[in-house]
Amino acid sequence: MSTIQEIKDAILLLSPEERQRLADDLPGLIPELDGDADWERIIRDTRPRPAFSALVDQIEAKFQRNPSAFAEIQERDFERQFPGQGH
């Protein structure tokens, strides 16, 4: 098996297209890079978060009183925030 440095050196020798293909494939090769695993860990975390829970309760109460005050997020909202970024 190669060392980490040998792997890094080999990656640097790849063409930009090959590096992009590798970057696209990395979450499948290294599951730790898959954001779903992070979200799953967060969802299953049972530690109490009183300040966060209070904030969620406050926002939920505001929403219950006046749902129309909360605009629905549209895809174009992200385009304005991050011009030139793909989605």
Image (tube, rainbow, N blue to C red):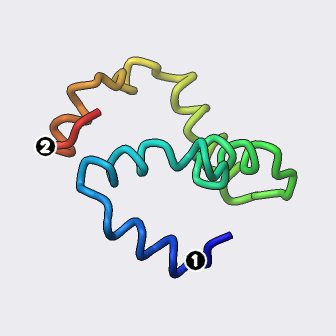
| Residue in view at x 38 percent, y 18 percent | 68
Residue position marked by numbered label 2 in the rendering: 83
Which quarter shows the N terminus? bottom right
**Toward the viewer: 55 or 12?**
12
Q: Is residue 18 above or below residue 69?
A: below
Residue 4's disc number: 1
- Can you tell which of label 1 and label 2 is closer to the viewer? 1
- Residue 60 percent coordinates (x, y): 60, 32
CA gap between label 1 and label 2 equals 36 Å
Q: Dividing the picture into quarters, in which one does residue 51 lie?
A: bottom right
| Residue in view at x 12 percent, y 42 percent | 84
Residue 26 lies left or right of residue 17; in this view the side is: right
**Toward the viewer: 8 or 37?**
8
**Toward the viewer: 45 or 58?**
45
Quick one: label 2, few (<14), some, or many (20+) residues within 10 Å? few
Residue 32's disc number: none
Q: Dividing the picture into quarters, in which one does residue 19 lie?
A: bottom left
- Residue that sits furthest to the right in the current view: 46
Q: Is residue 36 above or below residue 68?
A: below
Amino acid at pointer 1: Ile
